[in-house]
């Protein structure tokens, strides 16, 4: 559970989805921007080429008027054409090679053109017209200008603001920007959905791995049916779990068999030692040794019996004996039993008042559960500490909380305390077998209930048992 929590809280920037999404968006952004920039400049070149062609045609139309109808007609044509267009858009001028203006449609904005009159010198005999694109102050767009020497001492200069071309380019640019944003957004969402799906399946494997380490070895990750690389991973992972489960079950069976095989000899040793204690033939020294043997054999015998009992309940060899029993009464009896121990240890043992909490359960086995939990709470709490018991009757279940202010359990040990023979580091110096919680869990689970623990080192632990009313 804790690890799951850690995974969901993992920094966004470290998640595979986030990194792939950023990478994908960057690739999309760079490639589409490159394509669109190329398109943009290509379109701009085409539009400018067309504008130059038009200007060239207009210029030669003016030169034709001069050639056919003479200079005076050209001047009239220039004035009337100039008037027909806005002075912001065009400027027609006839000038002398030294820059003196003979006639112009310019009213004020086109003064900047004078700085570029050197362009005229570029005109050759082969191509007497010079066309250039310029930027001049006062005109907000690019300007295309043509110079042509149409008579020995006369130059026609035609300048045109590329407003339509600029407007076309601006709207083209807007379309490109909107398209890039759309592609990025739609592409990002589609990529996120795909990644989420794929990573979700990988997370499934991780979630199962984590729950297996803490809950049970029987779980398997379901196959998606896509038969892809992730299904291969799931198959490999499930196969590994099969082998681990086989090993663990094998180990458990070995332990059960050893316990089973040891029970008779250890019991016989104890019986022999007990008989020595009662016989008159043995001297005091021998009786003392016999007494030690009886004492020392209690530990192994308890271990053997508890191991065998866990197995018997687990496998159903020793089924539960269900009767109507009052959990509040069972807990109170266990509480009374340990009151003296608590007093001797200087621990406050407190139980909240509660009414009857009747369930369908095995009285004797439930007695062992709560005796074990209260015993542990007192065992792992130092003098001056407190152990409190609280019973809560719910509609379908009874919840018992046993909280202590003891040594606590480290986070890495929390998921393991219910394992057989597991003892946490904090409690190694306190006698115990590491079987009490395992037995408690087996009994509670066989009632259809659950047992959980919350703890922090140095602050104490709380064991919570939930038993359904109709287990
Ligand atoms: P043990 O005989 O060692 O008490 P249990 O199965 O009852 O065996 O408990 C397993 C381990 O869980 C203990 O060794 C101890 O490390 C830890 N534990 C159980 N109850 C508590 C508790 N109330 N406070 C701190 N640690 C506990």
Image: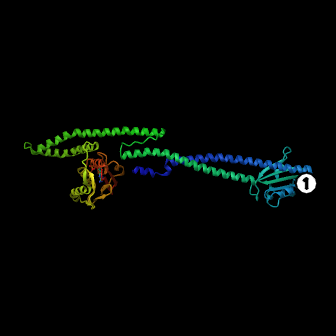
Residue at 21 percent across and 40 percent down: it is 263
Q: Does residue 413 appear to the left or right of 165 in the view shown?
A: left
Within 8 Å of ligand 1, the CB of disc 1?
no
- Left/right placement of residue 121 relative to residue 286 reads right
Q: Tell me which colouring the rendered structure shows.
A: rainbow
| Label total for image | 1
Pointer 1: what residue? 73
Kindly identify the residue that appears in the image at 59 percent across and 46 percent down. Answer: 28
Farthest-out residue, left:
280
Residue 346 placement (x, y as % from top left): 24, 60
| Rendering coords of residue 171 (x, y %) | 69, 53
Residue 370: x and y in percent read: 26, 53
Q: Can residue 291 be seen in this view?
A: yes
How far across and how far down the image is residue 408, in percent? 32, 54
Q: In this view, does 452 lie to the left or right of 56?
A: left
Front one among 230 and 314: 314
Label 1 packing within 10 angstroms: few (<14), some (14-19), many (20+): some
**Nearest the camera: 190 or 75?**
190
Q: Quadrant of residue 312?
A: top left
**Which residue is painted at 17% across and 44% down in the image?**
293
Under circle 1, the secondary element is: helix
Residue 430 appears anywhere in the view = no
- From this view, report whether residue 459 is shown above or below residue 417: below
């Amino acid at each position: 559970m804790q690890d799951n929590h850690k995974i969901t809280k993992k920094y966004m920037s470290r998640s595979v989805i986030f990194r792939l999404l950023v990478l994908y968006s960057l690739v999309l952004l760079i490639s589409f921007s490159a394509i669109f920039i190329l398109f943009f400049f290509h379109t701009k070149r085409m539009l400018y080429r067309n504008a130059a062609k038009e200007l060239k045609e207009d210029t030669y139309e003016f030169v034709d008027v001069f050639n056919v109808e003479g200079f005076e007609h050209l001047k009239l044509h220039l004035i009337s054409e100039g008037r027909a267009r806005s002075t912001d858009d065009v400027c027609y001028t006839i000038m002398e090679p030294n820059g003196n203006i003979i006639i112009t449609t310019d009213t004020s904005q086109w003064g900047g053109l004078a700085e570029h009159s050197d362009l005229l010198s570029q005109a050759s005999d082969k191509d007497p017209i010079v066309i250039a694109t310029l930027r001049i102050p006062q005109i907000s767009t690019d300007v295309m200008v043509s110079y042509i020497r149409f008579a020995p001492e006369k130059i026609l200069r035609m300048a045109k603001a590329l407003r339509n071309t600029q407007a076309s380019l601006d709207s083209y640019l807007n379309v490109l920007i909107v398209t890039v944003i759309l592609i990025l957004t739609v592409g990002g969402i589609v990529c996120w959905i795909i990644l989420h799906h794929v990573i979700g399946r990988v997370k499934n494997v991780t979630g199962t791995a984590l729950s297996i380490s803490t809950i049970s070895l029987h779980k398997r990750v379901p196959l998606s049916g896509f038969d892809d690389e992730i299904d291969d991973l799931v198959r490999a992972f499930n196969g590994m779990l099969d082998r681990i489960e086989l090993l663990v079950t094998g180990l458990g069976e070995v332990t059960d068999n050893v316990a089973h095989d040891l029970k008779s000899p250890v019991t016989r040793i104890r019986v022999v030692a007990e008989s020595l204690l009662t016989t008159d033939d043995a001297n005091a020294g021998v009786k003392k040794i016999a007494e030690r043997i009886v004492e020392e054999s209690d530990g192994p015998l308890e271990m053997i019996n508890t191991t065998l009992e866990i197995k018997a309940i687990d496998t159903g060899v020793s089924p539960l004996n269900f009767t109507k029993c009052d959990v509040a009464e069972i807990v109170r009896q266990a509480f009374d039993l340990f009151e003296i121990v608590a007093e001797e240890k200087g621990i406050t043992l407190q139980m909240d008042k509660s009414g009857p909490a009747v369930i369908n359960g095995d009285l004797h086995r439930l007695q062992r559960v709560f005796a074990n939990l209260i015993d542990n709470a007192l065992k792992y709490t130092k003098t001056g500490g407190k152990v409190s018991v609280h019973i809560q009757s719910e509609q379908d279940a009874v919840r018992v909380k046993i909280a202590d202010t003891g040594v606590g359990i480290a986070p890495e040990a929390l998921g393991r305390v219910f394992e057989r023979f597991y003892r946490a580091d904090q409690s190694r110096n306190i006698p115990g077998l590491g079987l009490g919680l395992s037995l408690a869990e087996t009994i509670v689970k066989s009632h259809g209930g659950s047992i959980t623990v919350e703890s922090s080192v140095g602050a104490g632990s709380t064991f919570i048992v939930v038993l359904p009313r109709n287990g």
